[in-house]
Every structure is written in C-alpha cells, then in structure tokens.
C-alpha cells in the first residue's frame, strides 16, 4: 500500500471538507502527536478533533486516536508521546548549548569581544541544531519503532485508510 500524500477530513458542524498534506497531514494522522484541535479550511474554525471525521469514515478523529492509542502500553506511550519528545528536545538543546559555550571559551583566546559575540552565535545556532537533532532522533528511534510494532505500518499516514 502506498503512502497517501494528502487526505481530507470533514468538519461535522459545517459539513465541509478540508484537505491536508505534508507535515500537517503527518502530525494529524499520528495519534502520538497529542493534537487536540485542528483547522477547518471552510469555516476557519480551530475545533476539537472530536468534531472531525476522516473522509470515508464514520469515526471522529478523536475516536481514531483513542482506538489506536489503547493498543499501546502506557509506559510506551510515555516514552513515545509528548513527554518523551520533550526529553529528547531538552537533551539536544542542552548538548547544543554546552557545545556553544565550549566554542565561546575557545574563542576567549582571541579576546573578550570574540568570546562573547562568537560564543553567543555558537550557543544560539548549536542549541537550535541540538533541539532539531533531538527531534529527528526521537522521531526515528522512538516513534517509528512504536508505530511499526503496535500498528504495523511504516508511516502513520497509512493508518487513516484503515
Ligand atoms: Zn467548518
């Protein structure tokens, strides 16, 4: 089965469809992303996921999340959910920050201005990179195996078609 590039959901109060694609589709399709609300492109309302159904389904997105999440043991959910993600972002950010400070200290040999300016740039840049790498690592090493093990798909976007 090939991974769909986009999908539609229907907003029950207004009865209109919204097409989502890319990263947005991936995050709404993934029960682990902890999404509570999503947008209706028709009426412009940011509404509870219980007010939306995937195209061709009677089940609301809230029920879809619930049905899939109860298949995963609680400790796995903690690890692969928001809390787990936050830990990885923090570790990445702290490592990046420390690396930036280290560069600042090395630049200290060139004088205090170089240390402060260079160190500050290095800290900002490396902290951002650290957070991003923490996120990518989390998605690849923590989320993907859980998705594969409990839902038997390689991509969360395949879950919406079942
Ligand atoms: Zn609407």
Image (cartoon, rainbow, N blue to C red):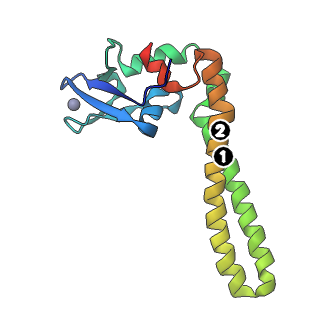
Asked if the residues shown at circle 1 and circle 2 are in contact, with their CB atoms under 8 angstroms apart, the answer is yes
- Taking the spot 65% from the left edge, 38% from the top edge, the residue there is 138
Q: Provide the residue designation for mark 1.
A: 134
- Classify mark 2: helix, strand or loop: helix
Distance from Cα at disc 1 to Cα at disc 2: 6 Å
Question: What residue appears at the point 31 percent right and 19 percent down from the top-left corner?
Answer: 55
Height in image: 132 above or below 72?
below
The x and y percentages for residue 142 are 67, 32
Looking at the rendered structure, which numbered label has been put on residue 138? 2
Q: What residue do we see at 67% from left, 25% from top? A: 145
**Which of the 4 image quarters holds residue 59?**
top left
| Left/right of residue 4 with respect to residue 113 in the rendered view | left
Tell me the quadrant of the picture where the C terminus can be found: top left
Q: Nearer the viewer, residue 2 or 41?
A: 2
Local secondary structure at mark 1: helix
Please, is residue 1 above or below residue 117 in the view? above
Residue 28 position by quadrant: top left
Residue 116, x across and y down, in percent: 68, 80
Residue 91 % position (x, y): 70, 48
Residue at (63, 72) in percent of width and height: 121
Pick the residue in front: 40 or 21. 21
């Amino acid at each position: 089965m090939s991974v769909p590039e986009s999908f539609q959901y229907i907003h029950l109060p207004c009865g209109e469809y919204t097409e989502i694609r890319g990263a947005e589709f991936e995050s709404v399709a993934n029960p682990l992303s902890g999404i509570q609300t999503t947008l209706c492109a028709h009426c412009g309302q940011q509404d509870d996921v219980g007010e939306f159904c995937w195209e061709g389904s009677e089940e609301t997105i809230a029920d879809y999340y619930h049905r899939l999440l109860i298949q995963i043991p609680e400790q796995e959910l903690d690890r692969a959910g928001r809390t787990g993600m936050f830990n990885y972002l923090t570790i990445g950010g702290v490592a990046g920050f420390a690396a930036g400070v280290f560069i600042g200290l090395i630049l200290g040999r060139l004088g205090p201005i170089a240390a402060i300016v260079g160190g500050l740039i290095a800290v900002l840049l490396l902290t951002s990179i650290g957070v991003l790498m923490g996120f990518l690592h989390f998605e690849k090493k923590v989320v993907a195996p859980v998705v594969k093990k409990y839902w038997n798909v390689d991509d969360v976007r395949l879950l919406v078609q079942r």
